[in-house]
Amino acid sequence: MHEYSIVASLIDVCEKEAKKHHAKAIKRLEVSIGRLSGIEIHFLEQCFNTFKEETICHDATLAINVCEVVLQCASCHEKSVVKENHFICPKCHSEDVKMIGGQELHIKSIEIIEDER
């Protein structure tokens, strides 16, 4: 279960950003996760809700956007979103494809609550 270490890293990034912007708390954290990233979304949510206590994210919500798998064909150069794990170009049916999306984990945004100084 690598979701624990992912959550620890996410909270660490939030703490660094909060410090940089003199924030007193994080209100919302939005991430994008590829469908084939190997991350179990429900475990990630559970881990976040468990480990956010007593951190800058204690009242934060976690928003997760799931990214589809995107292939690029080396034969016809078409970029295609595939819903199933069928790694063949839908346009020319070539198997010479490269996955260019669907395995990522990105922080899209961190919404902070500023310290009133």
Image (spheres, rainbow, N blue to C red):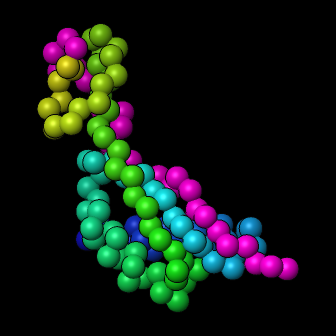
Could you say which quadrant of the image residue 25 lies in? bottom right
Tell me if residue 10 comes above or below residue 87 in the rendering.
Answer: below
Q: Quick one: quadrant of the C terminus?
A: bottom right
Tell me if residue 64 comes above or below residue 112 in the rendering.
Answer: above
Tell me if residue 66 comes above or below residue 79 in the rendering.
Answer: below
**Residue nearest the observer in this picture, 75 or 40:** 40
Looking at this rendering, what residue extends furthest in the right direction?
Answer: 117
**Residue nearest the observer in this picture, 29 or 74:** 29
Q: Is residue 110 magenta?
A: yes
Residue at horizontal 25 percent and vertical 24 percent from the top: 97
Q: Is residue 86 magenta?
A: no
User: Is 32 placed left or right of 36 in the picture?
Assistant: right
Please report the bounds of the magenta region as a residue range.
Answer: 91-117
Judge whether residue 12 can be spotted in this image: no
Judge whether residue 106 can be spotted in this image: yes
Residue 83 in percent (x, y) is at 21, 36
User: Is 111 placed left or right of 72 in the picture?
Assistant: right
Q: Quick one: quadrant of the N terminus?
A: bottom left
User: Is 48 placed left or right of 35 in the picture?
Assistant: right
Residue 48 in percent (x, y) is at 40, 75
Residue at horizontal 42 percent and vertical 71 percent from the top: 7
Residue at horizontal 34 percent and vertical 50 percent from the top: 66
Instruction: Give the mark count.
Output: 0
**Residue nearest the observer in this picture, 26 or 103:** 26
User: Is 16 placed left or right of 21 in the picture?
Assistant: left
Could you say which quadrant of the image residue 95 lies in? top left
Residue 81 in percent (x, y) is at 29, 30
Residue 87 in percent (x, y) is at 18, 30
